[in-house]
Image (cartoon, rainbow, N blue to C red):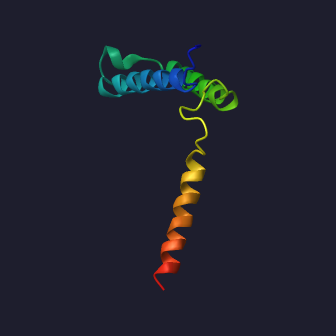
């Protein structure tokens, strides 16, 4: 069976690296590690935006864990329907 990976996996890793680099730059502002040029951070943020756009535009690589599951919206509508049923029975 082919492995289906999360399209957001690479984005989350890159975002974590970007935030870590920004934190290092902020903590050591007056020392050598803080001398990281701003254009490097800008480039990293732009790459993360491209990765997020790719994950949003091409999400078809992920197969739902449970087949037949309606997903988040079905859970919300079921909760809403049950809430109205309990409210009507309470009258």
* Residue at screen point 59% across, 13% down: 2
Figure quadrant of residue 48: top right
Figure quadrant of residue 46: top right
Task: From the top left corner, tell me how far across and down residue 45 is, in percent.
Answer: 54, 26
Task: From the top left corner, tell me how far across and down residue 72 is, in percent.
Answer: 56, 47
* Residue at screen point 60% across, 28% down: 63
Q: Nearer the viewer, residue 89 or 84?
A: 89
Question: What is the total number of numbered labels drawn onto the structure image?
Answer: 0
* Residue at screen point 50% across, 69% down: 83
Question: Would you say 71 lies left or right of 91 here?
Answer: right
Q: Nearer the viewer, residue 28 or 12?
A: 12
Q: Answer above or below: position of 29 versus 78.
A: above
In this orientation, does residue 38 appear?
A: no
Outermost residue, bottom direction? 91
Task: From the top left corner, tell me how far across and down residue 42 is, in percent.
Answer: 54, 24
Q: Answer above or below: position of 64 versus 30.
A: below
* Residue at screen point 58% across, 59% down: 77
In this orientation, does residue 62 appear?
A: yes
């Amino acid at each position: 069976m082919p492995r289906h990976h999360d399209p957001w996996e690479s984005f989350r890793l890159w975002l974590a690296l970007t935030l870590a680099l920004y934190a290092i730059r902020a903590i050591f502002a007056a020392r050598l590690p803080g001398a990281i040029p701003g254009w490097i951070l800008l480039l990293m943020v732009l790459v993360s935006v491209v990765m997020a756009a790719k994950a949003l535009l091409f999400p078809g690589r992920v197969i739902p864990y449970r087949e037949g599951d309606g997903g988040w919206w079905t859970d919300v509508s079921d909760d809403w329907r049950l809430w109205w049923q309990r409210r009507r029975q309470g009258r």
